[in-house]
Amino acid sequence: MTTLVIAEHDNASLKGSTLNTITAAIQCGGEVHVLVAGFNATAAAQGAAQIAGVSKVLHADASHFADGLAENVAEQALAIASAYSHILAPATAYGKNILPRVAAKLDVSQISEITKVDSPDTFERPIYAGNAIATVQSTDAIKVITVRSTGFDAAATGGSAAVETIAAVADSGKSAFVARELAKSDRPELTAAKIIVSGGRGMGSADAFKVLEPLADKLGAAMGASRAAVDAGYVPNDWQVGQTGKIVAPQLYIAVGISGAIQHLAGMKDSKVIVAINKDPEAPIFSVADYGIVGDLFDIVPQLVAELG
């Protein structure tokens, strides 16, 4: 029994979500191999080899892997799939784009967003926006699985796996990379941040979000938002936390003016400590909060900033 992890990377280093996926792969039992399909991605492959628990790194290098096009990476995974009992990828936009193609061509059922490995063929995953946990058993010869990174600790370094160069599949020709627009910010990336300050519809306007900036600056935090705030145009889409946004589990999550709709709770309730600030004492957010403050956020947030010195 051997598990293949499809690494998400930028050709220079692995994304953090890959480390969480490797932990899940280790728990499946047997050896763990990591596929690094990229262009001039030797550094990423070497980084994968240093992860504890990884037995082998398979490095496929070609120009058509440079931008992680799903059609090409999926074909590379399929070319070696027969040697594996499990194929895992992070449940990010990257993994969610690749693995359904792999599962379809292997004619197996994909198991999505697992948060726990009970045994090599049995896994747990959230359903109904996280209100229930389904235990899923698979009898497929090859189990194709996406891994929710918040459910697993990141794998540690300290490994010394061999890096094997494998033949790259040909360019599928089905897609071409056109452009990428990246949001630039001096703050931590939302899904990797240890502290997040989020605002909701209760902020009232885009300008009002500036009230949260001094608090985020004091804490070195990323800034997030509920879907209601994003839909209202207060903040950009890439700030959205929730079932249809980003799934986060920081050490500290501060929810300001967020009522706590079920879709938002699904994206942040695994946070280690949750602080809620809302003027409505009946707001659902208080049901998951470790600490709650009932009051006007425009009075409370500046007081918090002052207390932080």
Image (tube, rainbow, N blue to C red):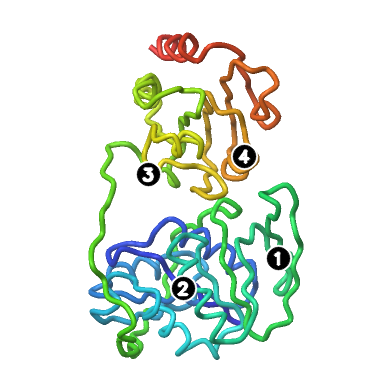
Q: Nearer the viewer, mark 3 or mark 4?
A: 4
Circle 1 packing at 10 Å, graded few (<14), some (14-19), many (20+), is many
Nearest the viewer among 280 and 292 is: 280
What kind of element bears circle 1? Answer: strand
Estimate the x, y position of residue 157 in percent, counting from the top left: 44, 59
Mark 2 / mark 3, whichever is N-terminal: 2
Q: Residue at x 59, y 70 (%)?
A: 145
Helix, strand or loop for disc 4: helix
**Mark-to-mark CA distance, 2 and 1:** 20 Å
Residue indicated by mark 1? 123
Amino acid type at mark 2: Ile
- Regarding mark 3 in the picture, which secondary structure is present there? loop
Pointers 4 and 2 in contact (CB under 8 A)?
no
Which callout, 3 or 4, points at the residue further toward the start of the chain? 3
When asked about the image quadrant of residue 213, the answer is top left
* Residue type, label 3: Glu
How many residues crowd around disc 3 within 10 Å: few (fewer than 14), some, or many (20 or more)? some
Which residue is drawn at the image coordinates 30% and 74% (left, top)? 38
Q: Give the residue type that dot 4 points to.
A: Leu
Q: Nearer the viewer, residue 188 or 113?
A: 113
Q: Position of residue 75 (x, y in %)?
A: 42, 85
* Amino acid identity at mark 1: Phe
Q: CA distance from mark 3 to mark 4?
A: 20 Å
Label 2: few (<14), some or many (≥20) within 10 Å? many
- Quarter that holds the N terminus: bottom right
